[in-house]
Image: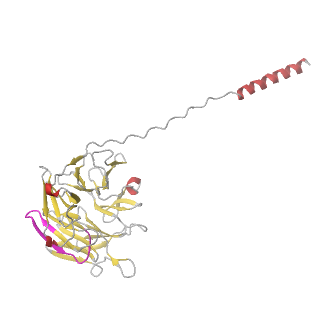
Amino acid sequence: MRNILYFFICLTLLCTCNDEEQDIVIPATEEQEPMPEPEPEIIDSVQVVLVEWPDELNDLIIQDFTARLPGYIWGCVYDRANQDNLLIFSYNILSGQTNVISAPENIGLPNFQVIESGPDGKLYLHSSGIVDNRIAIFDTNNNIWSSIEIPGFINGICVDEVNNNLWVAHKNGVSRYSDNILSTFDENNSILSRVVSGTNNSFFGSLLTVDMSGTLWYANTNVLYTFINGEWSLHPLSPLSDSYIITHIVASESEGVLIKVPNESLQQINSTEEIRNYNSITELIESQRSPINIIGRLSDESIIYSHQDGFSYYDSAGNNVVQVNSTNSILPSGNHAYKISRDSEGDIWIGGNQTLAILPSEW
């Protein structure tokens, strides 16, 4: 009997201990405040150049520019006060002096929106938007204007600095202007083919560039051609996409070209194969800031591209993309449709609206 009583006493104590363990209250943890958003890194080494227009022409907008001619920035501008003015400007990099030059009324173009420069000091200007078939030429050596007529509305132009040729993509093919002679390639005398759009409409593409070796690259929607030693070839990787057209094709400073297909790829290729691609860098492939101009640098394989409100820099060593705009630099706010161009000293310039800026050497 005593043993039975002892057993029940022990059982009662054990149950009491278990109940006490179950009744232990764990104090609630305090809710942690969310971490503050990191402050944007301030890029204080972008140098904005103040372009001082003449007093009577203080309402000019930079449409396009080139820094390829030594010592100067040359560009075409839009005069908001007088839309009929056909104007170009030169900016002396050393002195900071700006000079505005008017084109003659009989030059035959409604406006200037695109400018390219040749190694002989000639500037080539045309109206974008496929509205005209004439190119204006300004010789900076003697300040003489002239123009040439192209057999079709102009889609795009580029200069072959190796052979000093002007290449023109237009509605009816591709033309080369060399030594005052215009030669045209189309479906009748080359492997180039038209893009058929609708029942009664067909056209040729608009994108072309010349790489460091003098090879011409020409994109017709998603089909890629090269012109080497007087012969056209279909690129082995063509077509580059089944869903999208090529939107950018630019000469790389190392080899071949950089080609962008939206939402799919950014790759560097030569005349036979892909050299490398940047497809793992989402910000370069699916950018919310659509690139306007792209530069692929030889020195460190970095990528710089301009967009509406600034520029983006892809650091290949750090494998990251830095956005530079008015929030983290002294670039002005607003959409300025910035273009970029490298000068003869190796500096990269960005320009648009009423702004010219030189990018720091570390970019």
Q: Position of residue 24 (x, y in %)?
A: 68, 27
Q: Is residue 186 above or below residue 112?
A: below
Among the 4 quarters of the image, the one containing residue 243: bottom left
**Can residue 127 be seen?**
yes
Instruction: Name the residue located 39 percent from the left edge and 81 percent from the top edge.
Output: 199
* Residue 19 horizontal/vertical position (percent): 75, 27
Q: Is residue 327 magenta?
A: no
Q: Seen in the image, is 195 located left or right of residue 360?
A: right
Which quadrant of the structure image shows residue 261?
bottom left
List x then y, in percent, for residue 328.
32, 44
Chain part drawn in magenta:
137-156
Query: Of helix, strand and loop, which mostly describes the magenta segment?
Result: strand
Q: Quadrant of residue 210?
A: bottom left
Can residue 150 be found in the magenta stretch?
yes
Residue in the foreground of this view, choosing between 54 and 195: 54
Q: Is residue 338 above or below residue 209?
A: above
